[in-house]
Image (cartoon, grey):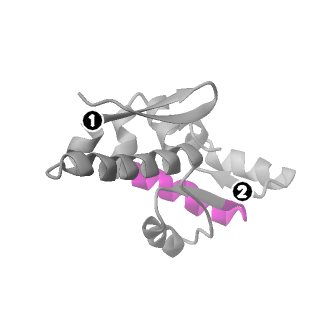
Amino acid sequence: MIEKSIAVDHLDAILARARELGVDMTQWGPADFSFSRGEPSLQHSEAIKPFEALVIQKSLEYGIHPRIELGSVEQAKRYIDMGVRHFCIGWDRFILRQQLVSSGYRHAQAYRPTLTRADNYRLFEYRLHDGCHKFTPQLR
């Protein structure tokens, strides 16, 4: 994973050694990268894109496939245009949360027809209990 500022600073050396060792894929980590620079909000800004593009471009130059995590299929085009062919679209916690928010919203609308999606986030909480996912509505 390329997720630290120091890794991006030494990207050529890391990728050269990875190629020698037969590593076949890189993974970009924007959240950890942002924190390692002391700029947590960087991960949600346009300013992260040049770093991400550099990791993708360099990975491809070294013949190592970059892998990108996406929240939805619609986000893939930009990366496909950059040469990325490997994606993780959603992940278990994200997919579960997305479904629970949607289900909770529909359930709450049955009781409050004027409820908006923004209201739904304030009305429902999602808790993990004993290693399993459990949906617990918390009307506030």
Residue that badge 1 annotates: 123
Q: CA distance from mark 2 to mark 1?
A: 41 Å
Residue at 65%, 44% (x, y): give it. Answer: 1
Residue 63 located within the stretch drawn in magenta:
yes
The amino acid on which the numbered mark 1 sits, given as a three-letter code, is: Leu
**Horizontal side, residue 87 vs residue 16: left or right:** left
Q: What is the secondary structure assignment of the residue under circle 2?
A: strand
Residue 53 located within the stretch drawn in magenta:
yes
Which residue is outermost to the front?
A: 111
Residue at 77%, 50% (x, y): give it. Answer: 18
Residue that badge 2 annotates: 25
Which residue is outermost to the right?
A: 21
Q: Nearer the viewer, residue 108 or 14?
A: 108
Q: How would you rate the neighbour count of disc 2 (Cα within 10 Å): few for under 14, some for 14-19, many for 20 or more?
A: some
**Is the magenta region chiefly helix, strand or loop?**
helix
The vertical placement of 40 against 105, above or below, is above
Where does the magenta region start and end? 48-65
Residue at 61%, 33% (x, y): give it. Answer: 132
Q: What is the secondary structure assignment of the residue under circle 1?
A: helix
Q: Nearer the viewer, residue 112 or 31?
A: 112
Q: Nearer the viewer, residue 17 or 73?
A: 73
